[in-house]
Amino acid sequence: MKKILSLVFLLFILFGCENPSTVPTEPTEPTTPTIEPLEPYESCEVPYLDQVWVCTWADEFNGDAVDETKWTFQDGGYGGGNQEVQYYTRDNTVVEDGKLKITAKVESMGGKNYTSSRLHSQYKANFKYQRILVSAKMPSGRGTWPAIWMMPTMSVYGGWPRSGEIDIMEYAGYQKDVIHSTIHTRKFNHNLGTQLGYESIFEGAETSFKVYELIWKPGELITYVDGTQLGIFRYVPGFNQEVPYHYAFPFDQEFFIILNLAIGGTFGGVEGIDQSAFPTTMEIDYVRVYTQDYNIYDEERPTTPTNIQNTRNTPAGPRLPYTIFWNASQDDM
């Protein structure tokens, strides 16, 4: 009997005191992380482009007034630093028939002889590495200077032009149907006469709506009109690596959208102003911003410039991009 009790006691010691954490468990199947696709912006009328671009911000101008949760009016007659002759006021903008309409008038205000409007999305909607589409019809008349463009939200690299400027589209009324696309940086800007830009004829700019587009990726900006490539700007790594990337290509920060109709100035007023053309109106059908959904490919969004190609084929044929780099010995800004 004592032998039996001793055996029971020994078994109790061996198995009764085993650490529960060492007890083997049944193997489980590995779990796959859930990839959540981007959700399209609720009011965007075209939620997807080319399957991988998702509309993440938009204004379709379907209301009866400017949506001031999205846009801010910039009033005043400071001339934009370009000797423009208009006074900006919100009174020259209406939303009707599903469109934003900015009308320039011959009208005295604030010491200026013309009035117009300028709107921007700063602090309300800021963008980086996205695809922006704006459907617009240009005003007519010599002296008009409408633009769809972008400026840096915070100017982290300094005041203009150090933090950059992206002109998706500019138009001068004295050059009918000629569309311009330009960038300005610390090294490349119109004050030095070194700005980088493209121009091309797109017939019907004043009589029909055209889609002005920017595809912005790390190290690359490409502009289009109705799907035809207009301009291409690329930063090429490898040149003068001892100087900061942003000196030549500061487009790695958030920017905001500007819609305006200027009068006169160093671009629009080159051939004077035809007062008989006023009032004249710039119309915007929509502004849509798309974000590439890398979750579809289970990839991370790129954050650095890597593209060093030299040409790109377009429906109009191959077009050379500007290859952008910085030469420290020529720092004259």
Image: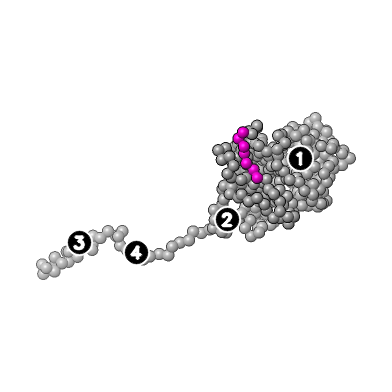
For the residue pair 276 and 314, the one nearer the viewer reads as 314
Residue 22, percent from left and from top: 30, 60
Q: Earlier in the sequence, mark 3 or mark 2?
A: 3
Residue denoted by label 2:
294
User: Within the image, what quadrant is residue 66 found in?
Assistant: top right
Q: In this rendering, which labeled residue sits more in front, label 4 or label 2?
A: 2
The residue located at (73%, 50%) in the rendering is: 230
Report the label total: 4
| 4 lies left or right of 146 | left
Residue 274, percent from left and from top: 87, 39
State the CA–CA distance, disc 1 to disc 2.
Answer: 37 Å
User: Within the image, what quadrant is residue 248 found in?
Assistant: top right
Secondary structure beneath dot 3 equals: helix
The three-letter amino acid code for the residue at tag 3 is Ile
The three-letter amino acid code for the residue at tag 2 is Tyr
Residue denoted by label 3:
13
Dot 2: few (<14), some (14–19), or many (≥20) neighbours within 10 Å?
A: some
Q: Are marks 3 and 1 in contact (CB under 8 Å)?
A: no
The three-letter amino acid code for the residue at tag 1 is Ser
Whether residue 61 can be seen here: no
Secondary structure beneath dot 1 equals: loop
Q: Are marks 4 and 2 in contact (CB under 8 Å)?
A: no
Q: Is residue 10 above or below residue 67?
A: below
Residue 140, percent from left and from top: 84, 45
State the CA–CA distance, disc 3 to disc 1.
Answer: 88 Å
The three-letter amino acid code for the residue at tag 4 is Thr
